[in-house]
Every structure is written in C-alpha cells, then in structure tokens.
Amino acid sequence: MGKQTKKELVEQGYRIYAGQELDVYFNLSMCQHSAHCLKSDHAVFDTKRKPWIVTDNASGETVTKIIDGCPSGALQYLWKEEY
Ligand code: SF4
C-alpha cells in the first residue's frame, strides 16, 4: 500500500503537527503506548508538553526514522513535496 494522503489521514482521525520540511500525523486511538517515539527524541516527542509533537525540533531525517519505527502506525508523516 502506498502512502496515504492528507485527506485520508485526517478522515481516519489523525491530527497534524506541521513543520517546515514535513508534517507529522498522529492518531491517538491507534497508539499502543510503546513509548518508542518518546524514548527516541524528547525534543520532538514529549507528552508533558502541548503540543506533544514539535516536528521541527529535529532534522526531517531523524523524525522520519523514528516514525518508521512506530509499531502501531499511529505516527505518519508527509514531506511537503508529497502533497
Ligand atoms: S511509537 Fe507509536 S505506538 Fe509507540 S507511543 Fe509513539 S505513537 Fe504510540
């Protein structure tokens, strides 16, 4: 399956955390609370902060690598050029 579009993600309940190079999408109802994302980079993922995801607090490469390791699919991303 290819990557989902913004419309598809939003329809499924993903929220958008916009950045300069890419946007991060998160769906709380899918999250398994494995804390993989939190352990990976606290500058980007921090549940004690609002918003809990700050996309631009690490490089796009770092952020996408972490998201690729999310076991549930609750985290997704779209690079700006993918829109
Ligand atoms: S890595 Fe994915 S499943 Fe694990 S806590 Fe983060 S968003 Fe939830």
Image: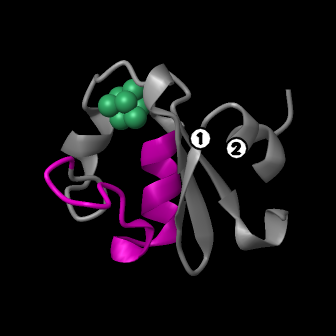
Asked if residue 6 can be seen in this view, the reply is yes
Q: Range of the magenta residues? A: 47-67
Q: Is mark 1 within 8 Å of ligand 1?
A: no
Question: Does the segment drawn in magenta span residue 62?
Answer: yes
Residue at left offset 69%, top offset 57%: 78
| Mark 2 and mark 1: Cα distance apart in space | 5 Å
Q: Are marks 2 and 1 in contact (CB under 8 Å)?
A: yes
51 part of magenta stretch: yes
78 above or below 29? below
Quadrant location of the C terminus in the rendered image: bottom right
Q: Horizontal placement of 40 versus 59: left or right?
A: left
Residue 11: name its quadrant. top right
Dot 2 falls on a residue whose secondary structure is helix
Q: Residue at x 61, y 77 (%)?
A: 21
Residue at 73% across, 72% down: 80
14 above or below 43? above
Residue 54: percent from the left, percent from the top? 36, 66
Above or below residue 18? Residue 77 is above
Residue occupying the far left of the picture: 48
The residue beneath circle 2 is 10
Amino acid carrying mark 1 in the image: Tyr
Apparent side of residue 10 relative to residue 34 in the rendered image (left or right): right
Q: Which mark is residue 78?
A: none
| Residue 71 visible here | no
Q: Which disc, if any, is residue 14? A: 1
For numbered disc 1, what is the local secondary structure?
loop
Question: Which percent across, then down, holds residue 19?
Answer: 53, 74
Q: Looking at this view, is 65 or 56 the one in front?
A: 56
Q: Amino acid at mark 2?
A: Val
> Where residue 63 sits in the image (x, y, percent)?
45, 58
